[in-house]
Amino acid sequence: DAKTTQPPSMDCAEGRAANLPCNHSTISGNEYVYWYRQIHSQGPQYIIHGLKNNETNEMASLIITEDRKSSTLILPHATLRDTAVYYCIVRSFTGGGNKLTFGTGTQLKVEL
Amino acid sequence: GAVVSQHPSWVICKSGTSVKIECRSLDFQATTMFWYRQFPKQSLMLMATSNEGSKATYEQGVEKDKFLINHASLTLSTLTVTSAHPEDSSFYICSASIGRGAYEQYFGPGTRLTVT
């Protein structure tokens, strides 16, 4: 799976949008972009995923650039409970594989 | 839906003893389960992948004789840390998937192991 690069940490004021960037310049055509988050001492939680098009669900929006070399996860109205480590993962399902390779992620701190 | 549980949530054991951690899929059948390990302030590292009814596939550098994985049913996988040492102290997380290919992984809450 392609490697991703994320900033190690970000701060965000409560109620504001949190925009978390991810660089995946070596992504190949059949690889998806996935986002998970991990609140301290808990298991990871799935947030959203996409291939080419932008995606939105009840938790977040995912914006993928046209060349697919980078993406941004948007939490539209961050709350204190969104404080967590956010992992951007690119993932291929070819060859029957289903592995997730976690990088170092971005520690998002939401503050009052 | 898609709930995965782990038991125990935390355990303290003495050096040299063995510890078993259970991972259960509560509302779906998990063909594939994964075991991860996470040291403090580090990311999750995949230890092994297990498919129901077959032997687990271990990642490079993970000792299969030390970390015994059993996936005997479609809802239960166990990880046994044998002859545990303080360096095995870590956060162990499992995930479960309904298939071997393009399926989502659902994560358990993790088990904190401390070896004294």
Image (cartoon, rainbow, N blue to C red):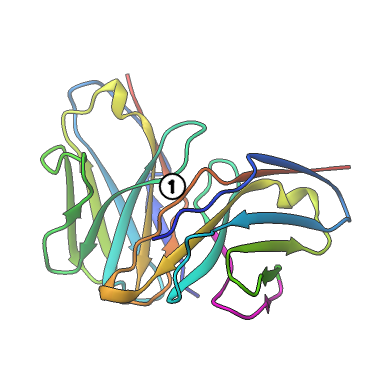
**Can you tell which quarter of the image residue A24 is in?**
bottom right
Identify the image quadrant of residue B38: top left
> Residue at position x 27%, y 68% from top?
B32
Q: In the image, residue B30 lies at what x, y percent?
A: 31, 72
A49 part of magenta stretch: yes
Horizontal and vertical percent for residue A45? 55, 59
Q: Does residue B100 appear in this view?
A: no
Residue B51, given in percent of the width and then of the height, sits at 20, 67
State which chain disc 1 sits on: B
Where does label 1 land, which residue?
B110
**Residue that appears at 47% across and 60% down:** A26
**Residue at image point 11% right, 66% down:** B54
Residue B110 rendering spot, x and y as whole percentages: 43, 47
Q: Determine which quarter of the picture holds residue B19.
A: top left
Residue stretch in magenta: A45-58
User: Which amino acid type is marked by label 1?
Assistant: Gly
Depth check: A69 or B31 in front? A69
In this rendering, position of residue A106 left or right of residue B52: right
Q: How many neighbours does mark 1 have within 10 angstroms: few (below 14), some (14-19), or many (20 or more)?
A: many
